[in-house]
Amino acid sequence: MVLVANILEVKGVSKRFGGVVALQDVSLSVPSQGIVGLIGPNGSGKTTLFNVVTGFYVPDKGEVWFNDGNRSERIDGLNPNEVFAKGIVRTFQIPRLFKSLTVLENLLVTPFAQKGENPLKALKPSSWIEEERALARKAVSLLRRFGLLEYANVRVSELSGAHIKLLETIRGLMTPAKLFLLDEPAAGVEAGAAHELFRLVRELRSEGYTFLIVEHRIEILMQYVDYVYVLHNGQLLAEGKPEEVTSNPKVVEAYIGG
Ligand code: ADP
Protein backbone atom coordinates (compact mmCIF):
# COMPACT_ATOMS: atom_id res chain seq x y z
CA MET A 1 0.00 0.00 0.00
CA VAL A 2 1.18 3.49 -0.80
CA LEU A 3 1.66 5.56 2.30
CA VAL A 4 -0.96 8.30 2.16
CA ALA A 5 -0.27 11.58 3.89
CA ASN A 6 -3.86 12.44 4.73
CA ILE A 7 -6.68 9.97 4.56
CA LEU A 8 -9.24 12.70 5.29
CA GLU A 9 -9.26 16.41 4.58
CA VAL A 10 -12.03 18.79 5.55
CA LYS A 11 -11.56 22.11 3.79
CA GLY A 12 -13.38 25.28 4.78
CA VAL A 13 -16.64 23.56 5.71
CA SER A 14 -19.61 25.65 6.81
CA LYS A 15 -23.05 24.42 7.76
CA ARG A 16 -25.97 26.34 9.15
CA PHE A 17 -29.42 25.32 10.33
CA GLY A 18 -31.74 28.30 9.84
CA GLY A 19 -30.14 31.01 11.94
CA VAL A 20 -27.76 28.66 13.76
CA VAL A 21 -24.23 28.49 12.43
CA ALA A 22 -23.22 24.94 13.35
CA LEU A 23 -19.89 25.02 11.49
CA GLN A 24 -18.03 27.98 10.09
CA ASP A 25 -15.07 27.59 7.78
CA VAL A 26 -13.72 24.49 9.53
CA SER A 27 -10.64 22.79 8.10
CA LEU A 28 -8.91 19.76 9.51
CA SER A 29 -6.90 16.83 8.30
CA VAL A 30 -6.44 13.30 9.53
CA PRO A 31 -3.18 11.58 8.61
CA SER A 32 -3.31 7.98 7.56
CA GLN A 33 -2.90 5.73 10.62
CA GLY A 34 -3.37 8.72 12.89
CA ILE A 35 -5.50 8.88 16.02
CA VAL A 36 -7.02 12.34 15.99
CA GLY A 37 -9.32 13.79 18.65
CA LEU A 38 -12.14 16.25 18.07
CA ILE A 39 -13.27 18.01 21.21
CA GLY A 40 -15.31 21.05 22.20
CA PRO A 41 -18.09 22.01 24.58
CA ASN A 42 -21.68 20.92 23.92
CA GLY A 43 -23.12 22.53 20.81
CA SER A 44 -19.71 23.36 19.34
CA GLY A 45 -20.35 21.46 16.10
CA LYS A 46 -18.66 18.08 16.59
CA THR A 47 -21.66 15.96 15.62
CA THR A 48 -22.42 18.21 12.69
CA LEU A 49 -18.87 17.71 11.44
CA PHE A 50 -19.24 13.92 11.72
CA ASN A 51 -22.53 14.20 9.87
CA VAL A 52 -20.93 16.20 7.09
CA VAL A 53 -18.02 13.77 6.70
CA THR A 54 -20.28 10.70 6.69
CA GLY A 55 -22.80 12.06 4.20
CA PHE A 56 -25.71 12.72 6.58
CA TYR A 57 -25.44 16.45 5.84
CA VAL A 58 -24.29 18.29 2.75
CA PRO A 59 -22.13 21.27 3.73
CA ASP A 60 -23.26 24.73 2.62
CA LYS A 61 -19.67 25.55 1.78
CA GLY A 62 -16.36 23.72 1.66
CA GLU A 63 -15.15 20.30 0.63
CA VAL A 64 -14.40 16.90 2.13
CA TRP A 65 -11.72 14.72 0.55
CA PHE A 66 -11.01 11.08 1.26
CA ASN A 67 -7.96 9.14 0.13
CA ASP A 68 -8.42 5.38 0.13
CA GLY A 69 -4.72 4.73 -0.40
CA ASN A 70 -4.97 4.79 -4.15
CA ARG A 71 -6.50 8.12 -4.95
CA SER A 72 -7.99 11.18 -3.40
CA GLU A 73 -11.67 11.76 -3.98
CA ARG A 74 -14.15 14.46 -3.07
CA ILE A 75 -16.90 12.92 -0.94
CA ASP A 76 -19.07 15.82 0.25
CA GLY A 77 -22.48 15.43 -1.34
CA LEU A 78 -22.33 11.62 -1.34
CA ASN A 79 -25.01 9.88 0.72
CA PRO A 80 -24.12 7.87 3.85
CA ASN A 81 -24.13 4.53 2.01
CA GLU A 82 -21.81 5.88 -0.64
CA VAL A 83 -19.45 7.29 1.99
CA PHE A 84 -19.46 3.95 3.81
CA ALA A 85 -18.69 2.15 0.54
CA LYS A 86 -15.65 4.40 0.08
CA GLY A 87 -14.21 3.08 3.34
CA ILE A 88 -15.40 5.29 6.19
CA VAL A 89 -17.20 3.68 9.09
CA ARG A 90 -18.90 5.52 11.93
CA THR A 91 -19.93 4.46 15.38
CA PHE A 92 -22.65 6.33 17.20
CA GLN A 93 -22.83 7.72 20.71
CA ILE A 94 -25.86 5.52 21.11
CA PRO A 95 -24.77 2.35 19.37
CA ARG A 96 -26.93 1.28 16.47
CA LEU A 97 -26.92 -2.44 16.95
CA PHE A 98 -29.77 -4.90 16.59
CA LYS A 99 -30.66 -5.43 20.24
CA SER A 100 -32.76 -8.52 19.74
CA LEU A 101 -30.07 -10.26 17.71
CA THR A 102 -27.06 -12.00 19.21
CA VAL A 103 -23.54 -10.62 19.24
CA LEU A 104 -22.48 -12.92 16.39
CA GLU A 105 -25.59 -12.17 14.35
CA ASN A 106 -24.87 -8.45 14.63
CA LEU A 107 -21.48 -9.00 13.07
CA LEU A 108 -22.97 -11.00 10.22
CA VAL A 109 -25.51 -8.38 9.19
CA THR A 110 -22.98 -5.67 8.41
CA PRO A 111 -24.32 -3.75 5.47
CA PHE A 112 -21.92 -4.46 2.70
CA ALA A 113 -22.17 -6.50 -0.43
CA GLN A 114 -22.93 -10.01 0.64
CA LYS A 115 -23.60 -12.01 -2.47
CA GLY A 116 -26.46 -13.95 -0.90
CA GLU A 117 -28.42 -10.69 -0.75
CA ASN A 118 -28.37 -10.36 -4.51
CA PRO A 119 -31.60 -11.99 -5.78
CA LEU A 120 -29.91 -13.57 -8.80
CA LYS A 121 -26.90 -14.87 -6.92
CA ALA A 122 -29.14 -16.08 -4.10
CA LEU A 123 -30.43 -18.71 -6.49
CA LYS A 124 -26.92 -20.10 -6.79
CA PRO A 125 -25.76 -20.82 -3.24
CA SER A 126 -22.34 -22.09 -4.31
CA SER A 127 -21.50 -18.52 -5.27
CA TRP A 128 -22.02 -17.15 -1.77
CA ILE A 129 -21.79 -19.95 0.75
CA GLU A 130 -18.00 -19.76 0.87
CA GLU A 131 -18.18 -15.99 1.31
CA GLU A 132 -20.63 -16.34 4.19
CA ARG A 133 -18.40 -18.94 5.82
CA ALA A 134 -15.41 -16.64 5.50
CA LEU A 135 -17.40 -13.82 7.15
CA ALA A 136 -18.43 -16.12 10.00
CA ARG A 137 -14.81 -17.18 10.50
CA LYS A 138 -13.74 -13.55 10.56
CA ALA A 139 -16.48 -12.68 13.07
CA VAL A 140 -15.51 -15.50 15.39
CA SER A 141 -11.84 -14.62 15.21
CA LEU A 142 -12.57 -10.95 16.03
CA LEU A 143 -14.78 -11.96 18.97
CA ARG A 144 -12.03 -14.23 20.25
CA ARG A 145 -9.39 -11.56 19.84
CA PHE A 146 -11.40 -8.95 21.73
CA GLY A 147 -12.56 -11.26 24.48
CA LEU A 148 -16.21 -11.42 23.42
CA LEU A 149 -16.34 -14.98 22.11
CA GLU A 150 -18.12 -16.24 25.21
CA TYR A 151 -20.91 -13.74 24.42
CA ALA A 152 -21.28 -14.80 20.77
CA ASN A 153 -24.77 -16.20 21.31
CA VAL A 154 -25.94 -13.61 23.84
CA ARG A 155 -28.47 -11.04 22.72
CA VAL A 156 -27.11 -7.50 22.53
CA SER A 157 -29.89 -6.35 24.89
CA GLU A 158 -28.16 -8.37 27.63
CA LEU A 159 -24.65 -6.96 27.13
CA SER A 160 -22.97 -4.35 29.33
CA GLY A 161 -22.50 -0.82 27.98
CA ALA A 162 -18.76 -1.40 27.58
CA HIS A 163 -19.27 -4.58 25.59
CA ILE A 164 -21.82 -2.85 23.37
CA LYS A 165 -19.30 -0.10 22.53
CA LEU A 166 -16.66 -2.69 21.85
CA LEU A 167 -19.02 -4.67 19.64
CA GLU A 168 -19.83 -1.59 17.60
CA THR A 169 -16.16 -1.05 16.89
CA ILE A 170 -15.64 -4.72 16.06
CA ARG A 171 -18.58 -4.47 13.69
CA GLY A 172 -16.68 -1.79 11.79
CA LEU A 173 -13.78 -4.21 11.48
CA MET A 174 -16.04 -6.62 9.59
CA THR A 175 -16.11 -4.10 6.75
CA PRO A 176 -13.27 -3.09 4.45
CA ALA A 177 -13.26 0.42 6.04
CA LYS A 178 -9.93 2.01 6.88
CA LEU A 179 -11.14 5.21 8.56
CA PHE A 180 -13.17 5.01 11.76
CA LEU A 181 -15.14 7.93 13.15
CA LEU A 182 -15.90 7.13 16.77
CA ASP A 183 -18.58 9.19 18.53
CA GLU A 184 -17.93 9.20 22.26
CA PRO A 185 -16.58 5.68 22.62
CA ALA A 186 -16.00 6.16 26.35
CA ALA A 187 -19.44 7.57 27.18
CA GLY A 188 -21.18 5.49 29.83
CA VAL A 189 -18.24 3.11 30.09
CA GLU A 190 -16.26 2.71 33.32
CA ALA A 191 -12.68 3.97 33.18
CA GLY A 192 -10.96 0.56 32.97
CA ALA A 193 -13.04 -0.53 29.99
CA ALA A 194 -12.62 2.87 28.33
CA HIS A 195 -8.84 2.57 28.54
CA GLU A 196 -9.07 -0.92 27.13
CA LEU A 197 -11.05 0.37 24.17
CA PHE A 198 -8.47 3.07 23.51
CA ARG A 199 -5.64 0.55 23.78
CA LEU A 200 -7.45 -1.44 21.14
CA VAL A 201 -7.61 1.67 18.96
CA ARG A 202 -3.81 2.00 19.31
CA GLU A 203 -3.36 -1.63 18.33
CA LEU A 204 -5.63 -1.25 15.32
CA ARG A 205 -3.71 1.80 14.18
CA SER A 206 -0.58 -0.31 13.89
CA GLU A 207 -2.57 -2.61 11.61
CA GLY A 208 -3.37 0.22 9.20
CA TYR A 209 -6.55 1.78 10.60
CA THR A 210 -7.11 5.50 11.17
CA PHE A 211 -9.31 7.12 13.81
CA LEU A 212 -11.08 10.43 14.27
CA ILE A 213 -12.64 10.45 17.73
CA VAL A 214 -15.16 12.73 19.41
CA GLU A 215 -14.92 12.30 23.17
CA HIS A 216 -16.07 14.23 26.21
CA ARG A 217 -13.80 12.37 28.58
CA ILE A 218 -10.80 14.41 27.63
CA GLU A 219 -8.58 13.06 30.41
CA ILE A 220 -8.80 9.60 28.83
CA LEU A 221 -8.77 10.70 25.19
CA MET A 222 -5.64 12.81 25.59
CA GLN A 223 -3.57 9.79 26.59
CA TYR A 224 -4.15 8.11 23.24
CA VAL A 225 -4.42 10.75 20.50
CA ASP A 226 -1.56 12.17 18.43
CA TYR A 227 -3.33 15.38 17.58
CA VAL A 228 -6.44 17.26 18.68
CA TYR A 229 -8.79 19.77 17.10
CA VAL A 230 -10.95 21.95 19.35
CA LEU A 231 -14.25 23.34 18.12
CA HIS A 232 -16.05 26.20 19.81
CA ASN A 233 -19.24 27.82 18.52
CA GLY A 234 -18.78 26.09 15.18
CA GLN A 235 -15.25 27.35 14.64
CA LEU A 236 -11.85 25.83 15.10
CA LEU A 237 -10.56 27.32 18.34
CA ALA A 238 -7.25 25.46 18.61
CA GLU A 239 -5.34 22.46 17.34
CA GLY A 240 -2.16 20.69 18.28
CA LYS A 241 -0.65 17.90 20.30
CA PRO A 242 -2.64 16.92 23.40
CA GLU A 243 -0.33 18.73 25.83
CA GLU A 244 -0.41 21.91 23.70
CA VAL A 245 -4.19 21.91 23.58
CA THR A 246 -4.79 21.19 27.25
CA SER A 247 -2.44 23.98 28.29
CA ASN A 248 -3.98 26.48 25.86
CA PRO A 249 -5.80 29.18 27.91
CA LYS A 250 -8.36 29.68 25.10
CA VAL A 251 -9.36 26.03 25.35
CA VAL A 252 -9.62 26.12 29.14
CA GLU A 253 -11.71 29.28 28.88
CA ALA A 254 -14.05 27.73 26.27
CA TYR A 255 -14.72 24.75 28.52
CA ILE A 256 -15.23 26.81 31.65
CA GLY A 257 -17.27 29.42 29.80
CA GLY A 258 -19.34 26.63 28.19
P1 ADP B 1 -21.86 19.04 19.43
O1 ADP B 1 -21.87 17.71 18.76
O2 ADP B 1 -20.49 19.65 19.54
O3 ADP B 1 -22.57 19.04 20.75
P2 ADP B 1 -23.70 19.81 17.32
O4 ADP B 1 -22.98 19.61 16.04
O5 ADP B 1 -24.69 18.80 17.74
O6 ADP B 1 -22.65 20.09 18.49
O7 ADP B 1 -24.47 21.21 17.27
C1 ADP B 1 -23.90 22.43 16.80
C2 ADP B 1 -24.99 23.48 16.74
O8 ADP B 1 -25.87 23.21 15.65
C3 ADP B 1 -25.85 23.55 17.98
O9 ADP B 1 -26.21 24.90 18.20
C4 ADP B 1 -27.06 22.72 17.60
O10 ADP B 1 -28.20 23.13 18.31
C5 ADP B 1 -27.19 23.02 16.11
N1 ADP B 1 -27.76 21.89 15.35
C6 ADP B 1 -27.17 20.69 15.15
N2 ADP B 1 -27.94 19.89 14.39
C7 ADP B 1 -29.05 20.63 14.10
C8 ADP B 1 -30.23 20.38 13.33
N3 ADP B 1 -30.42 19.21 12.69
N4 ADP B 1 -31.16 21.36 13.26
C9 ADP B 1 -30.97 22.53 13.87
N5 ADP B 1 -29.88 22.85 14.61
C10 ADP B 1 -28.93 21.91 14.73
Image (spheres, helix red, strand yellow):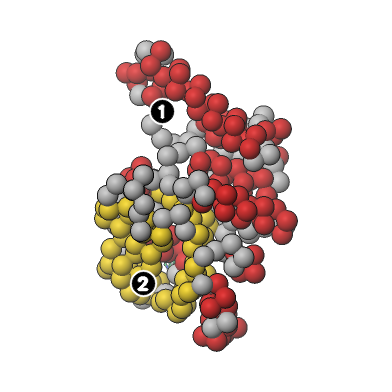
Residue 146 vs residue 253: left or right?
A: right
Image spot of residue 145 (x, y percent): 63, 37
- Residue 185 figure quarter: bottom right
Q: Is residue 26 visible?
A: yes
Q: State yes or no: discs 2 and 1 in contact (Cβ < 8 Å).
A: no
- Residue 49 figure quarter: bottom left
Q: Residue at x 50, y 59 (%)?
A: 35
- The residue identified by callout 2 is 26
First in sequence: mark 2 or mark 1? Answer: 2
Q: Could you tell me the amino acid type at mark 1?
A: Gln
Q: Could you tell me the amino acid type at mark 2?
A: Val
Image spot of residue 11 (x, y percent): 31, 67
Q: Quadrant of the C terminus?
A: bottom right
Q: Which mark is residue 74?
A: none
Q: Judging from the image, what secondary structure is the residue with disc 2 in?
A: strand
Q: Does residue 133 sit above or below 5 in this rendering?
A: above
Label 1, residues with CA under 10 Å away: few <14, some 14-19, many ≥20: some
Label 2, residues with CA under 10 Å away: few <14, some 14-19, many ≥20: many
Q: Is residue 89 visible?
A: no
Residue 13 vs residue 229: left or right?
A: left
Q: Does residue 100 sit above or below 238 in this rendering?
A: above
Q: Judging from the image, what secondary structure is the residue with disc 1 in?
A: loop
Report the front residue among 253 and 81: 253
Q: Which mark is residue 114?
A: 1
Q: Residue at x 57, y 38 (%)?
A: 98
Q: Residue at x 26, y 53 (%)?
A: 73
Of the four image quadrants, the one with ligand 1 is bottom left
